[in-house]
Image (cartoon, rainbow, N blue to C red):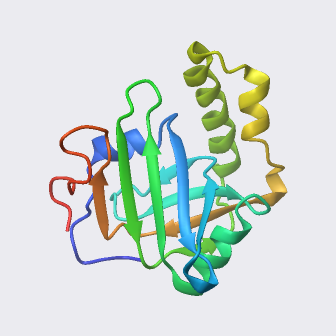
């Protein structure tokens, strides 16, 4: 997954999508039907060229099948308090095993998202149930973003990120 092209993401974008944001991903099922799943954490490579999103195997089965079939993946990262939203798309996605530290990343993500949603009346129990997944059922999808868009509601929604192809 190494690319000679400069990365689409900068460090600020990488920090944003690796934080306590809502993560939703989509791929395509046979027949062109969409498959959707919630991500359980994100890690961006140090050089910002690849993005790793963690999923539960059962909850994301259709998305993972779509990735295995086509390599295509779209992921939306949204901050609940501001609705700031970034969308990334890639066509070289691979389903991989977790790497050392990824299970702890999921725990940190879950803890952070509990805090993000608490002011809106979502209980800790509800958020933990939403993001629950046994460690042995976690997988990672790694992809190189080929396009990136601001999807924050407003007049610039849908515009490519600065520097994006």
- Relative to residue 73, is residue 78 depicted above or below? above
- The image position of residue 9, as x and y in percent, is 28, 55
- The image position of residue 16, as x and y in percent, is 39, 39
Q: Tell me if residue 99 can be seen.
A: yes
**Quarter residue 145 falls in:** bottom left
- Relative to residue 153, is residue 160 depicted above or below? below
- The image position of residue 38, as x and y in percent, is 62, 51
Quadrant occupied by the N terminus: bottom left
**Quarter residue 63 falls in:** bottom right
Report whether 147 appears left or right of 53: left
- Relative to residue 123, is residue 109 depicted above or below? below
Q: Nearer the viewer, residue 137 or 75?
A: 75
Q: Tell me if residue 96 can be seen.
A: no
Measuring 57% from the left and 13% from the top, which residue is drawn there? 119
Measuring 52% from the left and 67% from the top, which residue is drawn there? 142
Judged from this view, the residue extending furthest toward the left is 163
Measuring 44% from the left and 33% from the top, which residue is drawn there? 79
- The image position of residue 7, as x and y in percent, is 26, 63
Measuring 80% from the left and 51% from the top, which residue is drawn there? 135
Q: Nearer the viewer, residue 137 or 34?
A: 34
Quadrant occupied by the C terminus: bottom left
């Amino acid at each position: 997954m190494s690319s000679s092209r400069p990365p689409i993401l900068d460090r600020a974008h990488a920090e944003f999508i690796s934080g306590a944001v809502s993560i939703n991903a989509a791929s395509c099922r046979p027949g062109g039907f969409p498959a959707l799943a919630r991500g359980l954490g994100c890690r961006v490579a140090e050089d910002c060229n690849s993005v790793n999103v963690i999923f539960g195997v059962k909850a994301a089965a259709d998305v993972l099948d779509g990735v295995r079939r086509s390599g295509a993946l779209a992921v939306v990262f949204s901050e609940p308090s501001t609705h700031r939203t970034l969308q990334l798309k890639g066509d070289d996605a691979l389903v991989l095993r977790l790497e050392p530290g990824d299970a702890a990343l999921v725990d940190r993500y879950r803890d952070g998202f509990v805090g993000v949603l608490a002011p809106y009346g979502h209980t800790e129990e509800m958020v933990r149930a939403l993001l629950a997944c046994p460690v042995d059922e976690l997988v990672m999808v790694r992809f190189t973003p080929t396009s990136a868009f601001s999807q924050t509601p407003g007049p610039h929604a849908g515009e490519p990120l600065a520097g994006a192809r």
